[in-house]
Image: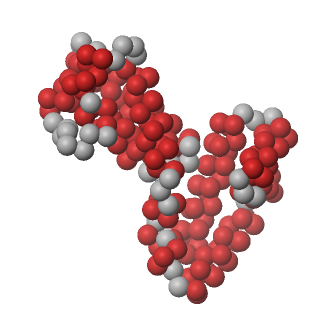
Amino acid sequence: MDKGVEINQSNFSKMLEWLDDDLEKAGQAYESIRIRLTKIFYARGCHTAEELADETIDRVTKKMDKLIHTYKGNPKLYFYGVAKNVFLEHTRKPVEKELPFHLKKEILDQDELEQRDECLTKCLKKLPKDENDLIINYYKGEKRKKIENRQKIMEDLDLTPQNLRIRAYRIRTKLQKCLIKCLG
């Protein structure tokens, strides 16, 4: 990423012009791209999807001077390629950065950890059996074993990888809401 390049009105205007010569259509394309990026990040389980979508757009906007002259093809595809890199960088960061402040491990004492574990157990029990089994098996194992577990889930439930990720995301969202409520 070009850290020395700032996002300014000129770069933003160039980006809109790159999307479409008609300013109104360019604005619609921009909104469409931002919404799609947010959906992509949410589908991949990112709780900071909107921030990641903005980061993606910022990175593309910073490269406008070069892109206008060198990139040939659908601009949306370029945004999605940059989004892939943003997502990969995001997954390398510790997960605690995404959690609400009161759930971060480094600030919890032993009593709080035990309370969180109790709440998680209660929240898991509140889930329907099929969702409970799915989310537990989704995270069971490490490395190759985890991959094999997820492949087995996909085969058993006749799901695509994306559908499995979406289901897991929805279950995690339910669990997170329950945990926040339980922890007060």
**What residue is shown at x 57% (from left), y 61% (from top)?**
176
Can residue 92 be seen here? yes
> Residue at the right extreme?
156
Q: How is the image coloured?
A: secondary structure
Q: Is residue 21 above or below residue 128?
A: above
The residue closer to the viewer here, 41 or 60, is 60
Query: Residue 30 occupies which quadrant of the picture?
Result: top left
Query: Residue 27 occupies which quadrant of the picture?
Result: top left
**What residue is shown at x 81% (from left), y 35% (from top)?**
158
Would you say 54 lies left or right of 23 here?
Answer: right
**What residue is shown at x 51% (from left), y 50% (from top)?**
91
Residue 129 in the image, given as x and y percentages of width and height: 81, 57
Residue 26 in the image, given as x and y percentages of width and height: 28, 20
**What residue is shown at x 37% (from left), y 47% (from top)?**
51
Can residue 16 be seen here? no
Residue 24 in the image, given as x and y percentages of width and height: 25, 18
